[in-house]
Amino acid sequence: MISYLSWKIIDLSNGKCSIFVSSWIWYEVLLSENTSLKLNLWDNFELFIYHNINENSQSLFWFITKEEKELFLELTKVSGVWWKSALNILDLWFTQIFDAIISEDINFLSQAKWIWKKMAEKIIVELKDKDFIKLKYSSSSVNQWDNTNKTVSIENNIYKEIKLSLVAMWYNQYKVEEILKDLPDELKDIWDIIPYVIRKIN
């Protein structure tokens, strides 16, 4: 069973990624839309893989971190949540998914495609008491964030989204925080702030 791969992307489209592993091995890997967008920024990758094998087929799923892989597996254990629905949930802000499960935020989870409110409620009921969910929630940088020393007035949820996005793209969390403390006043929109932070880090 495959659990880890280091590869180079050959083709990327429609939630599928064709990858080159060696001169005679190519794989097709399934991934979320959010992950697909991040792949455009990288060339060579070290990726966590879930290798699903059943009597009819075999499929490979791509994850940036082991935590994402674990969450995907927990979601697919919920009756009625198939792999595509689980990937759609991962398109939401990753750390906030744990927050939503613990705080029973049905509206947040139902933002994911094909996740209706009854299904979101079922996910919360079945996962909120799992040790993995509780541990990740308690150690989440979202819940430890402190706005005390921040000099620029950005709404908390915007700051969280920017920080989580950049950390998920493997930028150093502490460098991101330092740059966000000293943002120019004219930068208010998330789509202006993210490119600015990336330029400053590079």
Image (cartoon, rainbow, N blue to C red):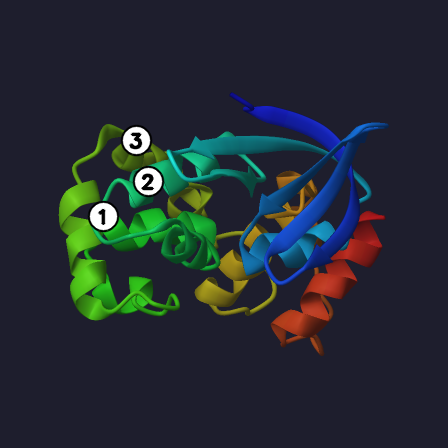
Q: Residue at x 69, y 67 (%)?
A: 193
Q: Position of residue 72 (x, y in %)?
A: 39, 42
Q: Give the labeled residue for mark 2.
A: 137
How dense is the environment of label 3, judged by Cα within 10 Å: few (below 14), some, or many (20 and up)? some
Q: Residue at x 65, y 43 (%)?
A: 28
Q: Residue at x 77, y 55 (%)?
A: 198
Q: Give the labeled residue for mark 3.
A: 132
Q: Position of residue 152 (x, y in %)?
A: 60, 66
N-terminal label among 2 and 1: 1
Disc 3/disc 1 C-alpha distance (Å): 12 Å
Element marked by disc 3: helix
Q: Mark 3 near mark 1, Cβ–Cβ under 8 Å?
A: no
Q: Nearer the viewer, residue 6 or 90?
A: 6
Element marked by disc 2: helix
Could you say which quadrant of the image residue 100 lies in? bottom left
Taking the image as shown, residue 25 lies to the left or right of residue 176, namely right
Taking the image as shown, residue 49 lies to the left or right of residue 141, namely right
Q: Give the labeled residue for mark 1.
A: 102
Of tags 2 and 3, which is closer to the observer?
A: 3
Task: Please name the amino acid that badge 1 sits on.
Answer: Ile
Disc 2/disc 1 C-alpha distance (Å): 8 Å
Q: Position of residue 65 (x, y in %)?
A: 54, 35
Taking the image as shown, residue 122 lies to the left or right of residue 22, namely left
Element marked by disc 1: helix
Taking the image as shown, residue 199 lies to the left or right of residue 35, namely right
Query: Which residue is most to the front?
Result: 56
N-terminal label among 2 and 3: 3
Query: Which residue is most to the top?
Result: 1
Task: Please name the amino acid that badge 2 sits on.
Answer: Tyr
